[in-house]
Image (cartoon, helix red, strand yellow):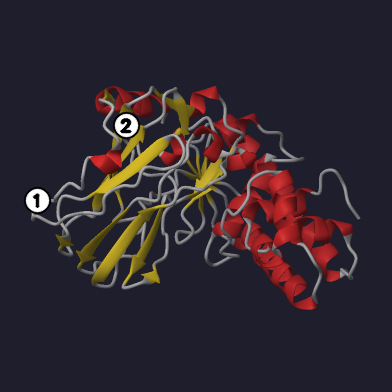
Amino acid sequence: MGQATRAFQGWLRGVVGACVLSACGAAPGEDGAVLEAPRVPPGEVAVELSVPRRSLGAQEEVALQLTFTNVSTHPVRLLRWYVPDAEGVKEGLFEVSRDGEPVAYLGPHAKRAVPEASDYLVLAPGERLTGRAPLSDLYDLSASGEYTVRFAAPVEGPHGVALTRVAQLDGAAVSLWIEGRPARPPDTHARDTVTAQGLGYIGCSSTRQAQVQSAWAAARGYASGAMAYLNGLRAGSERYGTWFGGYSTSHRDVARGHFSRISSALNTAPIVMDCTCTDAGTFAYVYPSAPYRIYLCGAFWRAATTGTDSRAGTLIHELSHFNVVADTNDHAYGQGNAQSLARSSATRALDNADSHEYFAENTPPRD
């Protein structure tokens, strides 16, 4: 990922003049369609979306051109996770709707580490960064209709990193007609090795297989402990309230159902561990509609087997994402953000993967 990003930067970066995007006018597509002119944001970076044509058949790839321009007078930083690179898009960067109704995001859900300096791209004043963002396999485009695509990267990045302080991103949008096409599942491969415990491996050394088996065993213990705790839960639980918010029997039952399916997956599902990911800033990621393959990345191998943001906890996090398990999302990363989410919205906390991980890890311990 890092080498691809650097190559992409060298190919696509270019310094432009002091033209303010909203004053430059909207660019017509190949068929003469006038696209929405990007607005100049009140912050530091303007975002522009464009498409070559406004009408796409079922056999044509749906791809946007996404351009970031530093409209400030000083260098600004962008988290590279929110910028398409040579490998495409790795986050749900867009809000996509069809005939006014939102459509589902089908792409990967990743657990990120706290960003480091290498996780940022720096734009000089007036500098422009352009990337191609394929959408065909990331969003549900199965029905024909008029689609609107709007850039909608999170205001707050992983672990509470405020993106608005380094780059105020504008919600640029385009509209286009798309003929429905069947969704293509992510690539799958045969398992290289299957252990006696039923784990499959892709690209994992013997050392990493042993590390995964330890994490898998610890995750089974976490899930079993969480189920036992939830089965005896009563109102007033500090541990439950910290991660899932206000107690109610219906919310408790949701949490119990999630951990029942997580525990079942850890004990009976044919889980495949893919060790081919090289992204140092990511623990792991999954495609929720493609159980039970988990892509393990650089931060996973640096983590401890148990404890906060551990390997075992990461497996709980990722398993919760699968549609057939708990179908969770990533509303908040990190313990502090997850606790704030629990206080503000119990419903969203019960839909948050990190909340499930921290409840299971229970570090520091809470009764």
In the image, residue 249 above or below residue 301 = below
At x 76%, y 54%, the residue is 359
The picture places residue 130, in percent across and down from the top left corner, at 29, 35
The picture places residue 340, in percent across and down from the top left corner, at 73, 52
| CA distance separating discs 2 and 1 | 22 Å
Which corner quadrant holds the N terminus?
A: top left
In the image, residue 268 above or below residue 43 = below
At x 17%, y 59%, the residue is 54
Outermost residue, bottom direction?
Answer: 250
Report which residue position mark 2 lands on: 129
Tell me where residue 80 sits by quadrant: top left
Tell me where residue 84 sits by quadrant: top left
Dot 2 and dot 1 residues touching (CB under 8 Å): no
Q: Which mark is residue 341?
A: none
Q: Earlier in the sequence, mark 2 or mark 1?
A: 1
Report which residue position mark 1 lands on: 30
Instruction: State the SS at label 2.
Output: strand
Q: Residues within 10 Å of mark 1 (few under 14, many from 20)?
A: few
Q: Is residue 66 visible?
A: no
Residue 214 horizontal side relative to residue 137, left or right: right
Outermost residue, left direction?
Answer: 31
In the image, residue 332 above or below residue 72 = below
The picture places residue 29, in percent across and down from the top left corner, at 13, 51
Which corner quadrant holds the C terminus?
A: bottom right
Q: Amino acid at mark 2?
A: Leu
Instruction: State the SS at label 1.
Output: loop
Q: Amino acid at mark 1?
A: Glu
Between 294 and 323, the one nearer to me in the picture: 323
In the image, residue 86 above or below residue 313 = above
